[in-house]
Each structure stands twice: as C-alpha cells, then as structure tokens.
C-alpha cells in the first residue's frame, strides 16, 4: 500500500498517508455504504489500532468494493448472507443490513436472503439474523432517536 | 407438508407422497439448478434416509427457491458467499458454483464474490473456495470426462 | 407444503394455510416443547417474516419432531449438545434447555451433556452453555418474575 | 492427574504413569466405545505427542464417559449431534457413529439425529454427516475388508 | 485424575479431592493468570457443576499450562489468536487478554495479534476482538470501579 | 494500494503493478515464510484470480507480517493456534506449520500449541491439527520425495 516513503524496509505504526488517493477512495466508499456513521466508526478503531483502521479502509472498501464486477446491492446481499451464516458477527450484520438498504435493496429482499439461509445454516443463525434485521428496520422507522454508532 | 392422509397423528417413515404438487415443484426446481446430476443426487440420499431426501426436495427447493422475491442468480451468489464463509461445506459449494453459472452468473462474478469474502472470513476460507471454483471451471471445460456426482 | 391451492406455480408471500393439519400439528408440537412462550415466539417472527414463521412451524416441529424414532427427551439433549458446540446460538440454547426439562430431562442430565461437550468444543463454548443453563434454572426457580419471551 | 511423583513442581513430557488406575480406566472405556481400533488410535497419537495421548485417554474417556449420569447410548447420540453441527470433524464423527452403534443405537436412530440437525445447522453439515454415516454402515456390512484406523 | 480412592469403578459427582497436589497446582496456575478473579470464577462454576469445575482447574491449568515447553506470554498470545478466530467466545477472550497482559505482553502486542487475525478470520471476528481488548484496557485504566467477575 | 496511476476512479482487473515496492516487499516476505513453494503458490492463485493474488501478497505478507511489533516465530505460532481452532483450514495450517519451523519454532513447540488448543476447541479440531503436523514432519524428513505445492 502507498506510504509517504515507498520503501521495502520495515514499517512502523502510524506512517500511513491518509491524504493518499487510495485512502480517500476507501473513505468515499465506506461513507457511501455506511452513511453518517462511517467516520465515527473508523475513528473509533483508529484511536486504538491505527494499522487496523488503515487496513479496514484501504482493503475491503478501497480495494474490493470499488471494483465494478458486481453492483453494490448484490455485494451487500452476499455479505448479509455470509454474516447470517457466520453467526457471531451480529454487530457487523447490522451495519451491512443498513448498507444493503442504502444500496437499493428492499426490506423484503433482505428478509428473503436471511430466510434462504435457514437451508444452509439452520434456524438459530437465521433467527438471530432476522431479529437483527428487525432492529435495523425499527431504528430506521424511528429517526428521532439518536442512532448509536454500531460496534 | 402434504401427505397422502393429512392427519395430525404421528407419522412414520416413507409415507410422503412424491406425486404431490409440492414434491414435483421441488424436483423441477432442483433440476433447474443442479442440472443432470439432480435426480441421482436425491436418489443417493433417499436410499439411506427417505425423510432427509423429502425435506431436502420440498423445503429449500420446493419452498424457498420458488419464491419470486429474488432472482435465481442473486440467490445462488448469496449461497456461494455463505458456503465460502462456512468453510467446511466445499462439496455443497461446488454444487452451488455450478448452479450459479447455470443461473446466469459469469465465472468472473463467482470469483468476485469469493474474493469479497476475504474481508469477512479471511484468506483460508476464501482460498479453499477459490480452488473449488477452479475445479468446477475445469470440469466444465472438459465435458468429455464423466462428471462424478458431487457428494 | 400444503397450500390453499396446491399448484406448482410461483407462490407469493402469505398464502400459507394456518388452518391446515400440518400447521396445527407443528403448533401443537411447539407448544409441547416451548410451553407458554410458544405462541408469542412464533407471532414475533410472523410479524416480520411470514414465510420464515411458516417454515419454522411446519418443518422442524411439524415434520421432524413428530417422528417417533427417538423420544423427545433424547432429541432435546441432542439439541442441547449441538447448540453448545455451535457457540453463537445461546438464545436458542436457552429455549432448548427449557424444552429438555419440560420433556423429562433432569437438570443434572442437562449439565452432564454440556460438560461432555468440553471434549468436543473446548471450555469457552461449554462455559457459555453452562452459564445459559444456570440462567434457565434460576428463572424456573423464581416463577414470580415475568419470564421474558426469549429471542 | 496422578503422576508417579505427585508434586506441584513443573512437569516434563512423558512422566505420566500408564499403569495408574485412572489411565487404565480410560483405556477400558475407550476400548468399549471404539472397539478393535482403540489401542492403535491412541498409539498413533502417542508416537507424536505423549501429552496429547495422555490427556485424550484420561480426560474424556477416563473422566467424563465413566460418570453414570447418562447412559452411553445417549452420550454417543449427543456426540453425533455435536460433530454433525461442527462440520469439519468428519473423521471423529465416523468414530462416534461407530461407537453409537456399538453402544446400542440403531442405524435408524443415528440417521434420525443427523436429520434433526438440518434444523440447527442446515443441509450442508447434515448432508456431509449423512454421507459419513453411510460410509460407516457400508464398512460394517463388508467386514472382510480390513478397516483402516480412522484418523 | 487422582481421587480419594483411586479405583477403576464408576465415580459419582463430588468425590474429587481439592486438597490433592494436582488440584492445588491448577489453582496456583489459574491465580497466576487470572489474578484476583480466579477463585470467584471457579466457585461460580463449582456451585452449578462440580465436575466441570474440577476438570477446568486440573486439565487446562494444572496439566497444560504448567508444562515448560512454551513461556506463558507466548501461550496467552496464542490463546488470544484462537479466541479471536473462534468469534463467539468474547467473555473468555476478555479473560485471556487480561491474562496476556499479566504474563508480560504489551497492549501493542495484543492488538498486533488481533490485527494479524484479520487475514485468517476476516474483519468481523477481528473487530469484535479489538473492541473486547479496548474494554479490558479501559477497565485496567479505571481501577477504582469494581471490576465485575467476567463470565 | 499503489497502482500505476493512483486515481480515485473505478479500477479494473489486472492493473496492479507487481514491480511496485509494496508488491516486492510482500513477495520477499512470503518467500521467507513459505520457502520454495511461495512463487508457485501465488502463481496458482493469480492464474484464476489476479485481484485475489494481489491482495494476498500485499495485505497479509506485505502489510501485516513486515511490522516489527512481534517476531515471526510468535506470529506463526499464533497462526497455528488460530487455524487449529478454525478446523476447516487444514491446507493452510500445513503451510503455516512449515512456516513456523522455518521461522525458528521447534517441532515440540508446534505440538505444544496444538495440544493447548484442546482446551479451547476440543479434541476433534486438535487431533486433526496434530495429524497435519505429523504430515509436515514426515515430508520434511523425506526430502527426496518431491513436495507437492500445498493448496
């Protein structure tokens, strides 16, 4: 990844260049998907682990999601499927259900993907995902309440 | 599920009606997705566990996949994402990569979904899925070899 | 599955027949296992996803659990073992520990199954299951408190 | 665990006492469950990792399985459920399906537990377990072939 | 394991000897790693399941961790890596991040192991682990608040 | 990541610059850890999915492993722990056991980490990892046989 001085020697923490094109491209993408919570989400990680935050911005968002092979809606539905099956990543599932809606998926489509996952991961995983979707839908319907930054 | 005598008493093995509309709808769907191997796949399961085979035909294929909320290509890409993340279900991933291609997905799109999953499940799961995709592509390119019924 | 009009055409949401024998058989079974919370549990799911609720009632409860190959107590202990190992499905484990007790298992037997799982899934999964069992036992011992419908 | 010299100082590899009552109790139990392959299974592990083998004999077999809270058949069916859900442990599932049959479970009961797990872990995990059961049944039906020591 | 009467007959619950050298060695080790919360943690488990508590003290702590092949800091970092990847065992991850710091690891090293796990388990698992590390660091920085016994 | 033309517009497949400092740093690192099989491993992935290969070289190897917070031996032991617990990633575990030995870990230390994981992931996962270690040790002892490029 681009760094102020592109050398092949050992790198120490914090010397990543946030003004670089690659970092900005990642931040643009993360804002498009996560909406208002994007910046605070990254800041929260950066405060503890700058390297983790850098990789999070530049790799999945700056690198993977900006490729045009698949449209964003299909990508997000695939991620909803994946996190439903994974079972333990409900905070991230919440973020990506929100992102799926932001990218043009309907609530019915999100629920359909989760329902389909019953066949691949069973009822417990799918039920927990369904309850997560319900929480996202409720928060969206009650915009007056301040939305907490998801973990 | 519809049975010859729709009663609420205990049911014993084997009394499911394969001539029923629901079973036929499931078999039609499974043939559309799995292609030539569909019937032998179900027969293989039925020989050992008739109840398992009945549920496999009527529930995911007869019930879930025939709903028109999502198109089949999107459904299959979501399943590819899910099985990539699950890690241990490579025989089924193979079947669904094949099904995704049959339902209109390009090889590039299948590889893209698997690559996206690096972000959600890491390199080992994604690498094993990529090798599975490669095996499907090679078998498709060499149609002269008899394709073994996937597990 | 049986529907008002048993056809093989595409089906749309909500046309499942809850008065059918298969749905009633599933509801009877789910009430036997989950007790007082059964109806509110299904209603909660149905409000968001009618298809998910229909499948949940008719497939595991109406279809699997009503087969007489295994007694209900053994089935529930197997489910306790499975959900202990799965690790992320503690809300469902809670429901099935309660169901195991309702189906004739003793607390000692439930704890024994969880302890046995140390060997197959390690201490973290087993410890979380043990704490879940403790929560169920405490709620059962304090019936005056209103029991919240488990997720 | 009992050692030749029961002290609280650091212990080095290999000083466990295989003549001790606890080790013998574990070996008796493992032979009861695994049958003829028990000794070669443990020897194979011991050749590489004596500590691993000692713990394997004394902990799950010498300690857990000799407790009389649950009968062995129920324990083995619970283990079959657990390993079905776990997905990646098919070599061990094979051993425990064999052990379940040895402890009095019928083939129908083993298949029933695996079928029940569709609801908790989905079709891929359950299908792979079903194919594993089929392999065990076939090997049992063809005793003339030398049975390879399962991994 | 050593018991008051070392026989090979069936054992019943509760006859383990906590005054034995092996149990004391395990308790010493668990106190060294978990610090002040060690005794209450084991008592909490013992109140519900004496067998579980006995195994927890004598097996991982009395047996595994007292072996001198690896230093404790390396062992704890490996456990942090393992629980990060496991995903669902955040209460235990919390305990072992605390133990890693107690055994000489720096906060930077703990964060580095978690960051490395992005490559093997993806962002959701690693992000949840990072947030768990942050919670441990904050509790350590605010010693005036009574630290709750972690589950 | 650095590309020939660092712009924030959409990127298409294949325009990554393998002559860049970051890619070379990653390749150097991957060769240090994987030894002779490093180049063929990456070539194999690149033939099917150039983007996947680029990310694999630049992210875990070029970015994570070149940071000097932890020594390589500790990193590799952590990865062995992680992949042991993950259960399904035995091809990658094989690569990293080999890499651990290459980075200074002894066979005894590798076996010790795997044995420790019994406590966190149970016997099936740990046993499969132990058998994988045995396979690596045997291949190392028989250098005359051509070592197949691990998947």
Image (cartoon, coloured by chain):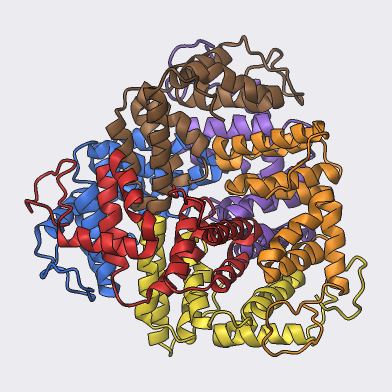
Chain colours: A purple, B orange, C yellow, D red, E blue, F brown
- Classify F9 as above or below B81: above
Drawn side of residue F82 relative to residue B21, left or right? left
Q: Residue at x 19, y 41 (%)?
A: D13
Residue E94 x, y percent position in the rendering = 36, 51
Q: Which quadrant of the figure contains the N terminus of chain B?
A: bottom right
- Classify E13 as above or below A112: below
Residue F136 x, y percent position in the rendering = 41, 30
- Classify D44 as above or below F133: below
Q: Residue at x 59, y 50 (%)?
A: A92
Residue D100 x, y percent position in the rendering = 46, 67
Drawn side of residue D119 relative to residue D82, left or right? right
* Quarter of the image where one finds residue E40: bottom left
Q: Residue furthest front?
A: D144
Q: Residue at x 33, y 61 (%)?
A: D31
The front one of F20 and B33 is B33
- Classify F17 as above or below F12: above
Q: Can you see residue E141?
A: no
The front one of C49 and F113 is F113
* Quarter of the image where one finds residue B65: bottom right
């Amino acid at each position: 990844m681009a760094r102020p001085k592109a050398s092949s020697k050992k790198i120490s923490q914090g010397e990543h260049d946030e003004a670089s094109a690659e970092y900005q491209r990642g931040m643009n993408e993360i804002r498009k998907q996560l909406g208002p919570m994007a910046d605070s989400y990254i800041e929260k990680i950066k405060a503890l682990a700058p390297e983790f935050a850098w990789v999070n911005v530049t790799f999945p968002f700056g690198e993977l999601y900006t490729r045009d092979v698949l449209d964003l809606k299909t990508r997000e539905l695939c991620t909803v499927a994946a996190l439903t099956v994974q079972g333990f990543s409900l905070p991230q599932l919440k973020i990506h259900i929100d992102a799926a809606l932001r990218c043009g998926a309907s609530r019915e489509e999100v629920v359909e993907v989760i329902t389909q996952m019953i066949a691949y991961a069973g009822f417990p995983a799918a039920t927990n995902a369904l309850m997560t979707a319900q929480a996202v839908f409720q928060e969206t319907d009650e915009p007056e309440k301040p939305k907490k930054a998801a973990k």
